[in-house]
Image (cartoon, rainbow, N blue to C red):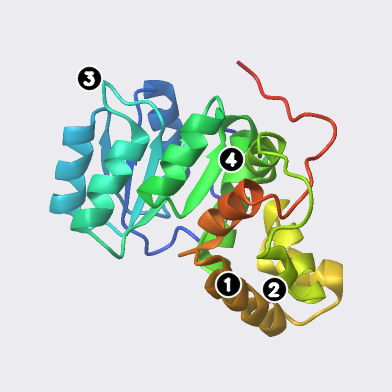
Amino acid sequence: MRERPGHSRPWLVGRRTVVASSDRVLITGMVVVFEGNGPLVGAATTEAEALTCLSQGDADLLICTAELDQGGTGPSLVAKAKASHPRLKCLMLIRRPLLSTIKAAIAAGCDGLCSHERMGNGGLLSVLQAMDSDGSHLDPLIAGVLQHHHNHRSGPTPLSEQLSVREEDVLHGLCRGLSNAEIADHLTLSIDTIKHVVSSLFRKLDARDRTQAVLIAFERDLVSPPAPIPRWKS
């Protein structure tokens, strides 16, 4: 974690946050990040400990990794946490963005996905800011992994024929891991227009949020794969 001590982090101020990870070094780094900004109401290494912290600390943000101690997993924790705390925002940090892990995180209801590789380069801040602005977000590296692994089909799907040109442009922006503000800047449109188009996409894709919309877009071959293949550190 290479966040600057004392740097203003408005996206953290007032949030009651629980951090859960099998990585003790990461937890220590997160404690430093939250110092003076949080409050950080709990830190845990197991699923059971994290659920206890969430219940006792009245948290509104959970940041967890895909791996937890004692056989626990981030997706399992998020699914249980969301069931008990529907308004809880959940961000998962993924060290090795395998397709199975990403799909499990999305299915569990994660509001944001951030690759471990980007955490120290402003990626964590970017995803949290996008979650505040857009409701949910996944970083470009993870979007690239989904995009590369989508099932290629020949010819347009019926759904693709139902999308307007503007909706297709916005969907491509979502699939690149861009925030609403970045898409608005790229397409020279207002942020309100982008939000309206995103809502329309949710209805047509039958998606609950941005991360699920991106997954559906790739599964239904509504976007093309990128080049080169995204890489990550082991």
Examine the rendering and report whether any part of residue 10 can be seen. Answer: no
Point out residue 44 in the picture as x, y percentages from the top left corner: 26, 33
| Residue that carries the numbered disc 2 in the rendered image | 162
Q: Are the residues at dot 2 and dot 4 in contact (C-beta closer than 8 Å)?
A: no
Q: CA distance from mark 4 to mark 1?
A: 39 Å
- Mark sitting earlier along the chain (4/1): 4
Looking at the rendered image, the disc whose residue lies closer to the viewer, 4 or 1, is: 1
Looking at the rendered image, the disc whose residue lies closer to the viewer, 2 or 4, is: 2
Q: Residue at x 82, y 70 (%)?
A: 185
Using a 10 Å C-alpha cutoff, classify the residue at mark 3 as few (fewer than 14 neighbours), some (14 to 19) or many (20 or more): few
Looking at the rendered image, the disc whose residue lies closer to the viewer, 2 or 1, is: 2
In the picture, the disc for residue 3 is 4
Residue at the far top in the pictured view = 234
In the picture, the disc for residue 70 is 3
Residue type at the position of mark 2: Gln
- Mark sitting earlier along the chain (2/1): 2
- Mark sitting earlier along the chain (2/4): 4
Residue nearer the viewer, 150 or 177: 150
Q: Quadrant of residue 99?
A: top right
Label 4's element? loop
Q: CA distance from mark 2 to mark 3?
A: 47 Å
Residue type at the position of mark 1: Lys
